[in-house]
Image (tube, grey):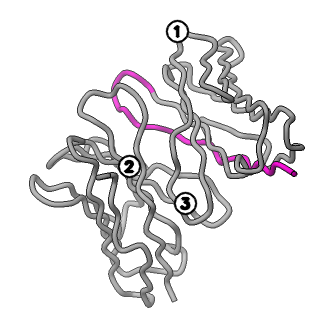
Amino acid sequence: NAGVMQNPRHLVRRRGQEARLRCSPMKGHSHVYWYRQLPEEGLKFMVYLQKENIIDESGMPKERFSAEFPKEGPSILRIQQVVRGDSAAYFCASSPAVHTGELFFGEGSRLTVL
Amino acid sequence: DQQVKQNSPSLSVQEGRISILNCDYTNSMFDYFLWYKKYPAEGPTFLISISSIKDKNEDGRFTVFLNKSAKHLSLHIVPSQPGDSAVYFCAAKGISGTYKYIFGTGTRLKVLA
């Protein structure tokens, strides 16, 4: 069952380090979304990408955060110089090329910043 | 600006009774609405959806109602089961421009045995 695969599931970083979260979409899906869930909060949209293109990054913090979805390989959400406030669960979701319905979510990557 | 709102952070229901979860939205350009269920330490899983051209969609124990004039949708679960205890998110999507999905803040449902 090739669902949306995220890794690592858990990541611990010290303040100032970099965090890289990876997401492989479902087979045949070319659209990837990243969401962040802070403790006791809902799912906040961060960025929407298609292969090699960022379509909408209106939810991404302007500094330290970046995302890519290369032609080959997984989508990567990169957080530079992490701070304690970056501690959250980061969820990736994918959808087919034609937007006929729902997003399919991965299990999430939980980032803890010490 | 929270475009999709779930004003009840939690709800407790007796097993066998109906659970009603509510969601309000502000953007009239949303044309597709979804409900997701999330267990702790897992990703959200899709439950049911509704297009803006409909006012009701049913799938087994789950029914979603859409009131476009009130910009309101609700999820009915009947009968409720203990395994339904989870956080429920509603989400909305617009058809033109971006295909961004906006999620509400979630309602934690607890079904009491």
Q: Secondary structure at mark 2?
A: strand
Q: Residue tagged by mark 2? A: A93
Q: Secondary structure at mark 1?
A: loop
Question: How far, Cα to Cα, is label 3 from label 1?
Answer: 31 Å
- Please tell me whether residue A109 is drawn above or below residue A2 in the rendered image: below
Quadrant in which residue A69 is drawn: bottom left
Residue at x 46%, y 49% (from the top left corner) = A45
Q: Chain of mark 1?
A: B
A97 left or right of A65 in image? left
Residue B33 magenta-highlighted:
no
Of tags 2 and 3, the one toward the viewer is: 2
Q: What range is drawn magenta here?
A: B94-113
Q: Pinpoint residue B113: horizontal percent, then vertical percent.
A: 87, 51
- Neighbour class for label 2 at 10 Å: few (<14), some, many (≥20)? many
Q: Secondary structure at mark 3?
A: strand
Q: Residue tagged by mark 1? A: B53
Q: Residue B19, which numbered label?
A: none
